[in-house]
Image (cartoon, grey):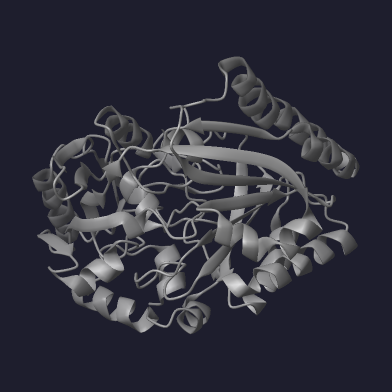
Amino acid sequence: MGSTASAKNGTWRNWGGNVSARPAREVTPASVDELAAAVRRAAEDGLPVKAVGTGHSFTSIAATDGLLIRPQLLTGIRDIDRAAGTVTVEAGTPLKRLNVALAREGLSLTNMGDIMEQTVSGATSTGTHGTGRDSASIAAQIRALEMVTADGSVLHCSAKENPDVFAAARTGLGALGVVTALTFAVEPIFLLTAREEPMPFDRVLAEFDELHAENEHFEFYWFPHTGNTNTKRNNRSAGPERPVPPLKGWFEDEFLSNGVFQVANWVGRALPAAIPSIAQISSKALSARTYTDIPYKVFTSPRRVRFVEMEYAVPREALVDTLRELKAMVDRSPLRVSFPVEVRTAPADDMTLSTASGRDTAYIAVHMFRGTPYQAYFTAAERIFTAHEGRPHWGKIHTRDADYLSRVYPRFAEFTALRDRLDPERRFRNDYLRRVLGA
């Protein structure tokens, strides 16, 4: 099944391999009507309901022992409105298919995350984002949304229609209903020039405010056990297109970032003591490069090395302190971390439970190779993040509960009140939602 989640003998597993579930039954509806009927039938049988995308979440946000809805037949573009600058797409459409289809039409999303395997509804419901000075997460680009609610009815929302639902459902965690279609703002396709270059950790932090202010999209990767980072700046360009040459691209993206990186992680898993030396080599392996291409070819890259991940959103002004504390913690600990730490930003947005809700945000993501013990590292990192009022990514590993989350999200009660109204019987419940939203 390639990169998607797998189901063997009735067991569903996520991409990271750290979550599994055994649903009582599965449906693959071919229309919104079929999906609504399946929700009504589940209600009659007293079963909870969950829709699942490609399983790219590391949390159990999509796990259910009730009815599992697979959306692979609810795919494709319903409508392109060039005058309004919008495209309406079925919820099960993978981002990759959306990006390719839009490019064929001479259109593009303004911003996106760094992988595109996920379905549009899975990505937006968990708050997937890239990096941007002015442009925010994928969900922030939604202009209208259609979903099936607990009683099997179809609800439409936008800034004008059911605005309270619109504020919450764009990043709805699967708690308010099953999203069936999304309308995104799009724009005529454009070119981005990416400039990747190594930079010392201390210099990136000293100059972070300028790097953020001067670039439309700035991000960097710090390699633990080293003082090295790799920075990436993406800015709009008048052209011409200068893609990465295929052989060079294969060497840098497939061989170094996926192939050699995979082997390095196998070595590191067998011999943790070798990781700091491997990190020094890895952090110097990627040399500076500049290329110009259409957005999705610049923003996204393949991720073939399986890992588990924790990511926290902290107030942007707290980023430098948070990272210095993270580095000090790794330096004085016996931890051996083979994956780089990824740092991105987003402007404040107006969604109830978006990680950037109401505040300019910086994201810090920590990763561990799949199959290595990650708890000690993630626990120590989480302690630092939460000291800065960090908000965990909804689809990535964390240990926070409703008590904590209600303190770091000013509009938390607004979301739970809406959930009480739309799903009073908790048709869309599961253990994860019980933990993060409360009973």
Residue 266 appears left or right of 214: right
Picture quarter with the N terminus = top left
Q: Is residue 5 visible?
A: no
Between 91 and 31, the one nearer to me in the picture: 91
Q: Is residue 302 above or below residue 436?
A: above
Between 364 and 203, the one nearer to me in the picture: 203
Picture quarter with the C terminus = bottom left
Residue 293 appears left or right of 24: right
Give how far across and how far down residue 116 sits, in percent: 43, 38
Residue at the image position 25 percent from the left and 76 percent from the top: 418
Mark count: 0
User: To which quarter of the image does residue 252 belong?
Assistant: top right
Q: Is residue 220 visible?
A: yes
Residue at the image position 54 percent from the left and 60 percent from the top: 345
Residue 402 appears left or right of 399: left
User: To which quarter of the image does residue 163 belong?
Assistant: bottom left
Residue 424 appears left or right of 327: left
Q: Is residue 288 above or below residue 50?
A: above
Residue at the image position 61 percent from the left and 48 percent from the top: 308
Q: Is residue 18 above or below residue 116?
A: below
Give how far across and how far down residue 322 sits, in percent: 70, 70
Between 245 and 31, the one nearer to me in the picture: 245
Residue at the image position 87 percent from the left and 60 percent from the top: 331
Give how far across and how far down residue 27 sits, in percent: 23, 41
Give how far across and how far down residue 12 sits, in percent: 42, 42
